[in-house]
Structure formats: C-alpha cells, structure tokens
Amino acid sequence: MAINKEDYLYISSLLRAREPRMLSRDKAGRMLDAPGFEDAAKMLTESGYEDMSQMTVKQIETALSERRAAVFHELETLVPDTAALDLFRLKYDYHNAKVLIKSEAMHRNDASLLSNSGRIAPDVMQKRFQEDRLRDLPGELGSASEEGRALLNRSANPQLSDFLLDKAYFREMNALAEALDSDFARGYVALLADSTNLRSAVRILRMGKDIGYLREALVSGGSVSEERLIQGISGEGLASVFAGSALAKAAQLGADAVSGGTLTAFELACDNAVAGYLADAKLCSFGEESVIAYLAGTENELTAVRMILTGRLSGVPSDTIRERLRDLYA
C-alpha cells in the first residue's frame, strides 16, 4: 500500500514535541558564556544529554556517536518509510567503506574509526571486507567499494578512491529521494550535491589542480550540472553560476577563498544554506519533511555540541567557537 503524508501524523507530532528541547542558538550561547567546560557540559542535560562534564575528548566523541545511533535506531521502528532515515544513515556506510579500504591499503587496523550509525553494522562490513564479499553489501555500496579498493591499489591516491565512493553515495541519495517520491527530499539532496560540488571546486582550485581533477570529484544530482559548473569556472566565475540560488552567498565567499580568502566563512555559508532550506519544513504540519528536517537538525546539533565541548575543553576562546557555529534547527 502506498505511503501518504497522513501516515506521518504520529511521528511528526512526536518530533515536533521534541523540538523545544533541542539545542538553540540561545542555549549554545549560554554554553559558550559558561565559566568553564564542566558548567557548559552540565547545561546539555536540559536537552536530554548524559552528563559529559567529566569526559575526555575521546569519550565525548563516543557519547555523541552513541546518541546519534540511538536516535536512528528509535526512528527505524517509527518512520512509515525507512528511506527518509536512510538518507542520513547512508553517509556512515560510505564513511566506513572508506575507512576499511584505506586500512587494507595501509595494513593497519582502524576499527576505532568506524561508525555505528549506518544501515550496516561495522562488524558486518568488516567481515565482508575480510571475506572479499563486497558484492553482498546493499545498493551501490558493494560495487563502489570494490572499485574504490582497486583504484587505490592502482593509483596510491586515497582521494581518488574517496571521490569514486562519493559519486556512488550521491547516486544512492538521489535514488532514496525518488523512492520517497518527495519534492522536499529531492530538493534537499540537490542542495547537498550543489554544496558538495561548490566545496570541491573551491578546494581543488585553491590547491592549483586542473579541471580534469575536479571532474573526478564532482557528484551528480545537483541543480547545477557538473558541466555547467566547469564552464562557469572557466568563464564567468563561481559567483555567477550560483547567482540567485540558496548558495549565492557561499559561492561569492568561495570565489574570495580561491583568491586567498578564508575558508571558514565559506564553509559556514554552505552549511547555513542547507539549514535555511530545512527551516521551511516547519511550515509543514506533518509528512516526510518533518522527519528529514529533524534528522538533519539532530546532525547539526551534534556537530555544534562537539564543537563547543571539545573547544572549551581544549581552551579554544568562546568567541572563536561562536564564529564557527552553524545555524541550528531549534
């Protein structure tokens, strides 16, 4: 039976009720203004986090990873269509594949770098690699992992292998958005692809690499095609390519960064463009939009919490952390 928006009534209501407890800009500001790390960490208990005031940086990373995995696990039993959840879990499957490919090539054990937030348990993926059964992995992940492994062995360039897996990742993201038959999901994935391609263009141009290398990095599915982006770089420039889009400000800052400007403001503008798109989901009373926005907001929240806590624990000035904080969903 086809899934419709009414099937999301319960979970949309549940997630809306949780929004007031999410980390807001105001709460983040109070954490940054707290006397010290321990005070900042204790404030998070108001948002349902465990007390991390006595944790090390590594323990904080573990706690936040476990919190993400717990959110994914809970929602798996509640979402009418797991494709909405897989839009976010997919990232961690591809992360784990990249880690294992490089681990094999370097003859080392990087199991501690694996994430438990994907669709596939880390130990299962490790076993597939050890038994050379990558084709048993779902979707494009298996074939992309085989190709990425072979490419790294041939080229000794881990970045090229990463590019190959990134292309497969976005093809699967687009397929999931189509499976949801959701314009909101399609728009979200397209904006992520555009943002990824803009970031790749800026970084590769700053490195002085040629257009051929950039082609290897670009992913499909954005509102700006790979060819249009390349033509723009060779012609009128990045700012013109994205003029009038959600990434217009980021593209202008990206053009400045290519010429020697800072990357920090550019990266912040890219992330805030995505956050601005997700804010529109609050206009929808129920539907897959609320699930996608909540999960993206949770990811942004965890990034902000990590940045604040590890920064304060390491003695980074609060104003420096504040400048780097992305827009939050709550």
Image (spheres, rainbow, N blue to C red):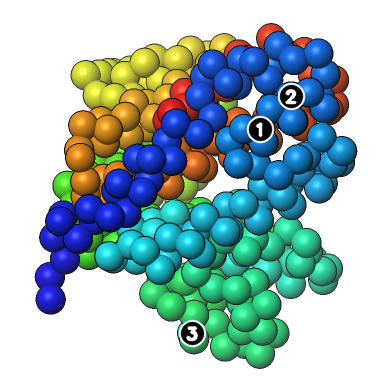
Q: Compared with residue 299, is residue 96 higher up or lower down, i.e. above or below?
A: below
**Residue ID at (68%, 20%):** 31
Q: Quadrant of the N terminus?
A: bottom left
Q: Is residue 227 visible?
A: no
**Residue ID at (66%, 84%):** 127
Q: In this view, does 31 lie to the left or right of 274?
A: right
Disc 3 marks a residue whose amino acid type is Arg
Residue 6 in percent (x, y) is at: 15, 56
Q: Is residue 42 visible?
A: yes
**Residue ID at (27%, 65%):** 80
Disc 1 marks a residue whose amino acid type is Leu
- Residue at the spot of label 3: 135
Q: How far apart are marks 3 and 2 (CA)?
A: 46 Å
- Per the image, label 1 sits on a secondary structure element best described as helix
Q: In this view, does 279 lie to the left or right of 28?
A: left
Q: Distance between the residues labelled 1 and 3?
A: 42 Å
What crowding class fits label 3: few (fewer than 14 Cα within 10 Å), some (14-19), or many (20 or more)? some
- Residue at the spot of label 2: 40
**Location of residue 252 by image quarter:** top left
Compare marks 1 and 3 and give the one earlier in the sequence.
1
Disc 2 marks a residue whose amino acid type is Ala
What crowding class fits label 1: few (fewer than 14 Cα within 10 Å), some (14-19), or many (20 or more)? many
**Location of residue 253 by image quarter:** top left
What crowding class fits label 2: few (fewer than 14 Cα within 10 Å), some (14-19), or many (20 or more)? many
